[in-house]
Each structure stands twice: as structure tokens, then as C-alpha cells.
Amino acid sequence: MTYDNLFTCDSLHKAPKYPRCLVKLIETLVPADFRGSITGPLRRYYIGTFVSCTGSGLTYSLFVIYLHNVRGFSTNFATLLLSAAALVGICSSPLWGTFTDWFGPVRVIMVAVVADAASLILWAHAHTESRAVLAALLLALFGGAGWGPSSTLLSRIVASEHRQRAFGFNFMLVNLGIGFGLLVSASIVNLHHPESFVVLYTFNAGVTLLGGLIVLTLRRYGGAIKEHREDEKLREEGWREVLRDRRLRQYVLAAVVLMIGGYGSQEAGYSLFVVNNLKLPVHVIGVIFFFNTTTIVGAQLWVLNRIEGKSRTKVMALVALIWFVFWVILDTALALPKVLAIVSLCVAMIVFAVGETMLSPVGPALVNEIAPEHLRGRYNAAAGLAWGLSGTLAPAITAFYFDDHLGNWWPLGTGITALIGGALMLRLGRLLSPSEDGRAPHPTTAIE
């Protein structure tokens, strides 16, 4: 019996060759019914997630450094190109959602993977501004195909009653892959040797293709659905029907506000606040984020058990409250000595990570619960817009605080924004049925 069998077998207690404490831990963290669902297709999907996110981790947050420090372009050029790429990603998301419904998620993912790998090669040799612009915009265009098709594929290969747990487990592997990629990247890149970045991005292209090959083994589950293509009424339905869904509109609005009070602002201004307002050295940021990643990997399975069967909208409202606490701790650090400030920031990052482990499973599960199968790609694309919009709006809001010398008020203002997002999530709960909100089993899979 392999460790793989240990994880999926229903009779773990019959495997005496493994430590009893390990068996007991797996039984506690991963319920038997979910273990039984981790068969070949889902297992391969998870391996693909880890491989793909390892590739993402290889080049994580190197965009501006690569353009400015390695290729010698101005910081203004680098930051403007980053903003333009984000805008391209937002605009392309609905298109990928439509293609997913027309052709199936696997075909869309494979086209994106091949184009992404080619774009990475072009990016690795971006010696001129025009080549850098072309490569960056292509990476943004095809990178926008990742979220929606992948979520649609996962929803197809796992039963509805396991979706929430499946998305949470996937999020854990995302962070594990990024963390592993960061470690590999640290051993390759060197600012004094620009060619190391060429090696890094070329390696990333290879890892991207490997992840695509794993997804290709799931083509049986990720094609266009024949019945939908042949049904004239279903073929005519599209974004008009998606936008008419009040539940989805309310979710996207609430998610945008919540993530401006979370991910978006953290990515836009956290490092700036730590260095400029708290006067801490830049190298402590890496230490602080280490606590974030390890908390997600270590706590995700435990959190999944705690939120199973709970109202999804209430869980997301609780995330808003947890993130508010994160921002209050960050603000409080202004009054602390440097050592205590660093300790408080590590604690704050653990708090933020707990909120991430709660949000990651319930958001996608809710969207895929309300989505009809023939529009699932578009629903996931619409939900993905919340990430893009928050990532675009949060930097502008953050800039307002810091440019007007209100940086010390930024954490508190952002925390209040998170609370508003939580209130909007509670309002969404009134529009959902018990099964859509996760408070009751799905009607088609309820246990008698």
C-alpha cells in the first residue's frame, strides 16, 4: 500500500505499517467520504494544480524587478505595463468564460498553456520595450484563462456535496506549489547574473507545459457537453442570462468590496506600510509572509472541517471580521517598538491566512452551486472579475491614502472596507436557498 492509497483508502486502520498517529490525523482532517472521492481524475487535477502553481511561484513578484533591475527599463514603464497587463486580464476574462462554455474547459486551458509557455520564452528575451509590452500583454491575456476554466473543470470531476472541501484542498495545494516555486526561484535568480532570469523564465515555460499535459489527461471530463450544443434554447443563452442573475451580481459586488479590504490592499500597500510607516527593514517582509503560507498549508484541512455545513455567506462575513482584526493589529504596530512590531505583524499575517482558508473554499463552491451547467464557465469568469477589479481599484485607493499623507490611517480605513464587504455578503444570504448557501445538502445528493 502506498501513501496515495493510505490517503484514499476507507479502511486506514488496516494499514499497521504506518504510524497510528498519522492514520488518526488523516482520518480526522480528511473525512472518509471525501477521501473516497479523491480518485484518479481528482488526484491528477490536484497534481496539475501543484505543478502549475510551482511555475507561478518561480516568478512570483519579479515583474517590476525584472524589467527595471535586469532589463534596465524605467520604473514608470514597468509599473504602467503592470497596470496595462492587469486591465487586459480583466477584459479577457468574460471571453474565456464564453469559450469555456462553448468548447469545454480542457481545450481552453490547453490553448492558454501553450500560448503562456511561448509568451514566457518571449518575456525571457525581452531586450526591447516593444518586446516587453508584447510579452506582458500576451501573458496577461492567456493568464486570464486560468481561473474560470480550472474552476469549471474541478466542479465537473467532484460531486456537488464535496465541492467546498475540494476547492479548499486545492487552495492549500496552490500555496504549497507557490511556496515550493519560491524556494526553487531563490536558488536560481541572481541580479548580478541577468542570464539567470532567462533560465528561470524558460524553466517556468517548461513547468507550465508539464502542468498542461497533466490537465490533458482529464479531457474526458473537460469537453463541451453534447446535450448543450444540440439544445437550441441552451445555445442561445449567454451573458444576458448570467447578468440577470441577481445572486451572482450581489456576490460579485460583495466579493469586490471584501477583497479590496483584503487581498487587493494587502498586495498594493502592505510592503509600503511596513517599510515607510513602520520603518522596518525590507527583508522582514519575506519572514512575515512565511507565516502566511505555512498557516494556510497547516490550517486549511482543519478549517474545512469547521466550516462544513455552515452558511457560506456567514462564513465570508466572518472572514471580513477576521481581516478587520488583521488591519487593526497592523495599525497598532505603529505604537510598538521594532521587535514587538515585527512579532505583531507575524501574528497579524497568521490571522489573515486563517481568513484566506475560510474564503477560498466557500466562494467558488457558492458560485458553482448557483451556476447552470451550460453557463458554468461564464459564471466562474464573472466571479473571477472580482479578483481583477479589486486588484485594480485597491492600488488607486491605497495611493490616495499615501499620497495625501494619510498612510497611518490606511489600515483602519481598509479594515472598515472589509466589514462593508462582510455586510454585503450577509445581504446575499437572503437571496440563496439553504443548499446554495451550504446549510443543507444538495437536493440531488442528499442522504436519505
Image (spheres, rainbow, N blue to C red):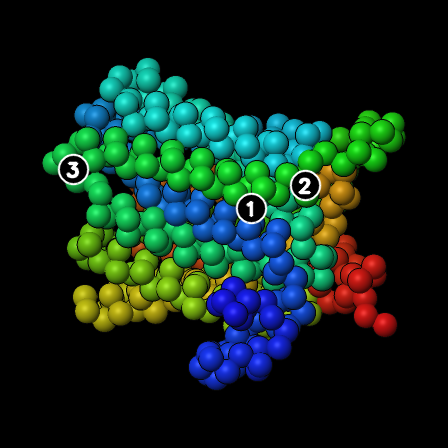
Left or right of residue 382, residue 372 in this image:
right
Q: CA distance from mark 2 to mark 3?
A: 44 Å
Identify the residue under disc 1: 256
Identify the residue under disc 3: 191
Identify which amino acid the numbered label 2 is placed on: Arg
Image location (x, y in percent) of residue 77: 29, 24
Image location (x, y in percent) of residue 288: 29, 61
State the residue at coordinates (19%, 31%). 195
Image location (x, y in percent) of residue 421: 57, 54
Q: CA distance from mark 1 to mark 3?
A: 36 Å
State the residue at coordinates (41%, 25%). 118
Going from the N terminus, do you reach mark 1 or mark 3 first? Answer: 3
The quarter holding residue 83 reads top left
- Check disc 1 and report its element: helix, strand or loop: helix
Q: Nearer the viewer, residue 291 or 124?
A: 124
**Quadrant of the image containing the C terminus:** bottom right
Contact check, label 1 and label 3, Cβ < 8 Å: no
Contact check, label 1 and label 2, Cβ < 8 Å: no
Instruction: Tell me the crowding category of disc 2: few under 14, some 14 to 19, or many 20 or more residues within 10 angstroms, Cα based.
Output: few
Identify the residue under disc 2: 220
Report if residue 179 is visible in the image. yes
- Check disc 3 and report its element: helix, strand or loop: loop
Instruction: Tell me the crowding category of disc 1: few under 14, some 14 to 19, or many 20 or more residues within 10 angstroms, Cα based.
Output: many
